[in-house]
Image (tube, rainbow, N blue to C red):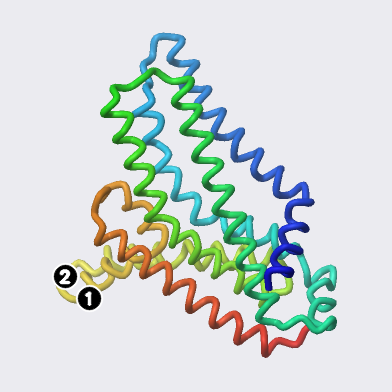
Amino acid sequence: MLNYIRAEFYKVLHRKYLYATQLVLLLCAGLLVAGWAFTNANGNHVDFATGGSLAVSLLGLGVYAPIVVGDMVFSDQYKFNTLKNEVSFGLPRARIYLGKLAVAAVAGVVMLLLTVGFYEGLCWLLLEPSAPGDAGQVLTIVGYCLLADLPQFLGMMALTNLIYFLIRSNTMGAFLAVGIMAVPPMVLDIMSLLTTVEGGLREALLTLNSWMPQNMVAGAYKVVGDWGFMAKSWVLGLVWMGVCTALGLWAFHKKEIN
């Protein structure tokens, strides 16, 4: 397994896709902070606490990042028949499936941490200084949200890995992944609004909607320091990971590769 993971890392690290994606993320972070620094030079007052804390509201986009990272690792293997070659060579399917999932998860987490760290560093260097207590509070908030959001990120990584292994087109797989991530929360939200009568059904819909990965990520900053929420986030993320990985392994073992 370790040899396979090393080989997959080697392939990912030698693709321009990885570096181009990371560069775009860093440029977007840099442009955002540079915009605030420019307004500060013209009389505005955006300090580190204000700019740095905005990172938690941008983490919601990270729920969809596994689609890009998964595509980066899987790399159209059906299109180029490389997956067929791996299976024909005699590599165990579980090793192939879990190896790619592990590489995608590690690559995605490293890219996330690099982007957030770069953003916070620029805010510290370029924006107005904050009171020591305020700066420390921002770092506490960002750290809590990152830790609470990580299982949701990994759960969605397991989902995208499942999709890319089962659907031959990476493009169609990406659209399907977006649909699975985005549509259920929208449907639950609409259904809860239409269910005007207070009671069990509406409460059940609202609760289920709050458990969706996007809403878990969006709600983390509101409950900083609540370790019950942290535990719930990790349980839900592990459920996503476990179910998607088990289903993916079973389906990939049954799938004919040609």
In the image, residue 25 above or below residue 105: above
235 lies above or below 12: below
Identify the image quadrant of residue 51: top left
Residue 12 pos. (x, y %): 73, 56
Q: Secondary structure at mark 2?
A: loop
Residue at position x 78%, y 69% in the image: 77
Q: Which mark is residue 201?
A: 1
Query: Mark 1–mark 2 contact, CB under 8 Å?
Result: yes
Label 1 crowding class (10 Å Cα cut-off): few <14, some 14-19, many 20+? some
Location of residue 225 in the rendering, given as x and y in whole percent from the top left corner:
25, 50
- Disc 1 residue type (three-letter): Leu
Q: Residue furthest front?
A: 2
Is 42 displayed left or right of 257 in the figure? left
The C terminus lies in quadrant: bottom right
Who's the residue at 50% across and 27% down the image?
Answer: 122
Q: Residues within 10 Å of mark 2 (few under 14, many from 20)?
A: few
Residue 27 vs residue 112, the one in the foreground: 112
SS at mark 1 in the image: helix
Measured from the top left, where is residue 57 in percent x and y?
40, 43
Q: Is residue 197 left or right of residue 88?
A: left
The reply to whether residue 93 is visible in this rendering is yes
Q: Residue at x 62, y 85 (%)?
A: 251
Quadrant for residue 54, please give it.
top left
Pointer 2 residue? 197
State the count of labels: 2
Nearest the viewer among 34 and 93 is 93
Q: CA distance from mark 1 to mark 2?
A: 9 Å
Q: Amino acid at mark 2?
A: Val
